[in-house]
Image (cartoon, helix red, strand yellow):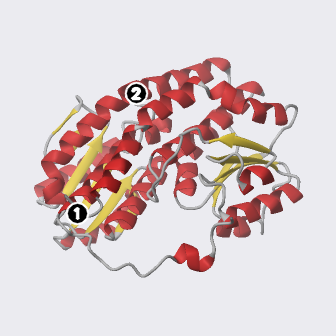
Amino acid sequence: MGKNAEYIQRVLGYVEENVPVTRSILAERKALCEAFLKGVKGKTFDRILLFGIGSSYNAGLMVKPLLESALQTEVLVASPAMYEQMCRSRRFDRALLIAASQSGKSAATIDVVKQLKAKGAFVVGLTGNLDSPLAQESSAAVDIHCGAENASVMTKGVLATAMMMAMIGLEYGVDNGLLAPKDYEAIMADFDKIAGHMPENLALAHKWCDANVEDWSRFRSFSLISNIDSTGTTLEIALKVMESIFLPADSFEVEEYLHGPHLLLSRKEAALLQLDSAGMDHAKLARIHQFLQEKQAPSYQITQVGDPGCTKDCLTIHSVKNGLLDFAEFLPVLQVWSIRLWQYFDQHGLDAFAMPGDLSGALATKVK
């Protein structure tokens, strides 16, 4: 029993809540987006800006490929600093901004919302608190719809944020003729199947962790790699590893990884975890994994290809094999992986480090 056992168990419970939260968002998407759709009736946008910090930013990266493909519209993902860069070459007076903050109190996000509204942008405040400063400053406020999450390590709120970003964009698209009804229905049918398979995939992830977590605890850094469409997912999990067990973790697109970072595996305490999508770069990732296994390098893989189950080095999940929706399949499974690793570290006192203090408080990143 670790010193944070109760807290970590609560976070694991939030990961399991991804199932009912996802199902509820899909079932109630029309009602959740109703006020937003009324507010944008008759409006046209030249681009969509998904905006946030940390996990909210990562959620935007997860959804960007889906919305760009479905709506055939430029979709940008930005943090406050990136927004300042973008303003040097772009105008946002005809943009649809979806600004996400679970607390609704992110000071930097609220500042950008004020600036964009003043320039004429339509701002959706996506938040878990409809009475928050973000909601009050927005053109329309939309509930993340995940319920309370009393933990600093955001889990179910990440998938809910990504899902709600997707619902806002897709509902706007089908309502305004940017997305054909048959294509909309096909996307929603795949989302429904993903939600249906989620309990089985979470159970498989726990089984895989049972077999491997002791071995994983010996590594002192992790690299996560994927195709370009899944970089938001791997960035999010690298963040979770760093903020829970205080180990270096990084995220790379597969080609980027091959041009230098793979040399970290020369250190026996470094390990690799791959997300192998059926939709893009499967053959490349499969060759990498096979090669590293032959070299006895620590390489692990979560894949959509093959019969669901797990071996020592590979977890195969149930999948609809729609690459644009990969985030909804991979994210909950990876959350189990990262939190179970944290649980093991806590149980064995491997995360007993003195913290340098709260930078968020030092920099006043939240408004009251």
Residue 40 visible in the current orientation: no
Residue occupying image coordinates x 29% and y 64%: 222
For the residue labelled by badge 1, is the local secondary structure a helix, a strand or a loop? helix
Q: Identify the residue at the far top of this view.
A: 182
- How crowded is the residue under tag 2: few (<14 C-alpha within 10 Å), some, or many (20+)? some
Residue 109 placed where, x, y %?
Answer: 69, 61
User: Taking 66 as reference, is 37 left or right?
Assistant: right
For the residue labelled by badge 2, is the local secondary structure a helix, a strand or a loop? loop
- Residue type indicated by callout 2: Val
The quarter of the picture where residue 255 lies is: bottom left
Residue occupying image coordinates x 42% and y 49%: 227
Residue 293 placed where, x, y %?
Answer: 14, 54
Are discs 1 and 2 less than 8 Å apart at CB?
A: no
Residue 33 placed where, x, y %?
Answer: 70, 32
Residue marked by disc 2 = 320
The numbered mark at residue 345 is 1
The quarter of the picture where residue 137 lies is: bottom right
